[in-house]
Image (cartoon, helix red, strand yellow):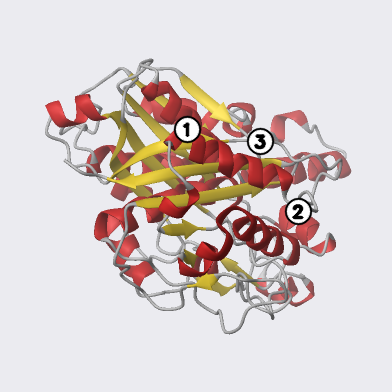
Amino acid sequence: MNSVVITGLGPISPNVEGTQDIIKFWNSTIYGNSGIRDLEELMWIKSDKFDSFPVKKAGKIIGFDGNEYGMSAKDARKADKCIQFALASSYLALKDAKVLDDSGKSKIADISVQMGIGLGGMETIETEIPRMVRGFDSGKSTYTRVNPTYVPTVMANAAAAKVTKNFGLLGEPITMSSACASSMTAIGNAYRSVKHGYYDIVLAGGTEAPLVPSALASFAMAGALSRSGISRPFDKERDGFVPGEGSGMLVLESRKHAEERGAMIYAEIVGYGAVADRTPDMTSPDEDGYGLQQTILKALKEAGIRPDKIDHINAHGTSTELNDLTESAVFNLIFGEYVKQIPVTALKSMTGHAMGGIGGLETIETAFALHSGAVPPTINFQSPGDGINLRIVTESYCPERMRYALKTAAGFGGQNAALILKRYEK
């Protein structure tokens, strides 16, 4: 079996403006900078009609320019936003791992792309279907109004395929969709691909660009979104999640391969778990947290460590009533009294919830936390909600011991995923 390390980090996050990279992301995150902003219009809902729309805030990326990440003018102009984010974060991760040549192609071709995505090319869908409907309503031919690249742009595997082709990769492009756990599912399976020797290097993570009227209206009608527009995981005033967008891609590599080529190593991945919830409900977790509990226990077992070896938890922390309560209950069940000593943080307080893309960003945050020895804050947290018994970090913090970290994720459909990361030691 191979030891698996992380050698490249590529974040595209709402809490960084303009051109992004891992250092800018980390600095913004460790200082608690929020990327949740007022929405003034949304695609075809212009500012003069926006007052009636139920969603007014989101974790929105500002100042994004695909040309800054080696993207062609055509891709920067025409590719769906979720694909653009995936290309940009992949470029950053591969560049950070020092596997790109001067032309922007990978010097190593045998790299698999394993991409998590929850909703896919929503902006393209939201653009093309109304275009066809308008043509039908006007009595004109409708099919000629649809962009011929519609299907190749919105198909679920488009982001993974595009990344594979753009960087000259020849490994298997794989797409995994497990709702808001998609990135973590992709990273977990990539970890096993390297661990079991199928690849020396895998590019893994996820992407999402769900800030479109239909998706946001659906979440609002379901009562899932924050009415206040404030993401405050685990706080007593939490009232739902704030939507977001973004992408996080990581280069996973066998330790032997990374050390032989002199790569900088951020952290190791030593355990992964994934177990489905038992409840038949598609949008709620198990009442007793069984699925998440078993997921974490599987990851701990693969890592070969006891619960009291965990020094930090990067929680899913959505700012919803059920998720945060379930996570707290499960953490207390697994860690017992020791849970009071574990610093817990939740990135969504700064970025909002980027669905299939958020797990990649949170895993990047966790890896860099181990690398730097510091834990970023959970902003907007003032006092714990009923049943929340956790040590929530509200200011950046450097624990005395920072060797193992737990990262959790959950998603609609009863999806759960957990990773155990370890500080890299030569």
The x and y percentages for residue 419 are 48, 42
Q: Residues within 10 Å of mark 3 (few under 14, many from 20)?
A: some
Q: Are marks 2 and 3 in contact (CB under 8 Å)?
A: no
The residue located at (44%, 17%) in the rendering is 172
Q: Are marks 1 and 3 in contact (CB under 8 Å)?
A: no
Q: Amino acid at mark 2?
A: Ser
Q: Is residue 250 left or right of residue 41?
A: left
The secondary element bearing badge 2 is classed as helix
Give the label, 2 or 1, closer to the camera: 1
User: Which badge, 2 or 1, comes first in the chain's sequence?
Assistant: 2
Gap between marks 2 and 1 measured at Cα: 41 Å
The secondary element bearing badge 3 is classed as loop
Give the label, 1 or 3, closer to the camera: 1
> Foreground residue, 325 or 68?
325
The x and y percentages for residue 355 are 61, 50
The secondary element bearing badge 1 is classed as helix
Please determine whether, in this image, residue 127 is positioned above or below residue 270.
Answer: below
On the question of residue 69 being in view, the answer is yes
Residue 418's disc number: none
Write down the residue under mark 3.
275
Residue 214's disc number: 2
Residue 302's disc number: 1
Q: Quadrant of the C terminus?
A: top left
The x and y percentages for residue 92 are 30, 45
The residue located at (65%, 46%) in the rendering is 293
Q: Is residue 275 left or right of residue 99?
A: right
The residue located at (38%, 65%) in the rendering is 16
Q: Is residue 417 left or right of residue 140?
A: left
Q: Amino acid at mark 3?
A: Val
